[in-house]
Image (cartoon, rainbow, N blue to C red):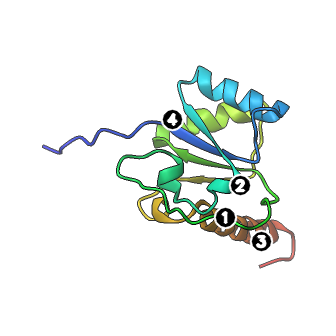
Amino acid sequence: MKARVRPEKEIFLLYGLEEETEKGKKLRELLSTMGIETVTVTDDMLSETVEFCAGLPGSTASGAPYGGESLPYEMMVMQITRPRLNEVLTALHKGGLLVERKAVITPTNRKWSFQHLYEQVCEEHEWMTAKAKPGQN
């Protein structure tokens, strides 16, 4: 018999989607109604690991200050099960809450700095966008 692994808490890290913005407020309200915790990732958190930003057990602060500019795009990083992911993405679509850059927390990327994950997601987004254009391969 397989051992059941209890999933960690459902949590969404939100960058560039501050609570003061209309989109940020609507997004948080929707996720809250679904029982999902949200964390606003601020510029001073960009050097921290994804797992630290999410408050996952065993994570510690890097202590490395972020000295760069604000990042230009909003991003959503999710810790959630596959069935719930589909449910949430459908609800976001129905609510008109498009966030183009998104990722799921994995055993690998949870150790990356939030900035590194952001950069990887942006590279992938650019590649996918270019590939989707007619005549591009």
User: Disc 3 vs disc 4: Cβ atoms closer than 8 Å?
Assistant: no
Q: Secondary structure at mark 3?
A: helix
Q: Which mark is residue 66?
A: 1
Q: Which mark is residue 81?
A: none
Label located before the other in sequence (3 or 2): 2
Q: Which residue is mark 4?
A: 84
Front position among marks 1 and 4: 1
User: Disc 1 vs disc 3: Cβ atoms closer than 8 Å?
Assistant: no
Determine the residue positioned at 86% across, 76% down.
135
Amino acid at circle 1: Tyr
Q: CA distance from mark 3 to mark 4?
A: 28 Å
Label located before the other in sequence (1 or 3): 1
Dot 2 alpha-carbon crowd within 10 angstroms: few under 14, some 14 to 19, many 20 or more: some
The location of residue 87, given as percent across then percent down, is 57, 33
Front position among marks 3 and 2: 2
User: Disc 2 vs disc 4: Cβ atoms closer than 8 Å?
Assistant: no
Q: Which mark is residue 43?
A: 2
Label located before the other in sequence (1 or 4): 1
Q: CA distance from mark 1 to mark 3?
A: 32 Å
The location of residue 55, given as percent across then percent down, is 47, 44
Q: Which residue is mark 3?
A: 131
Q: Is residue 112 left or right of residue 125?
A: left
* Quarter where residue 108 is shown: bottom left
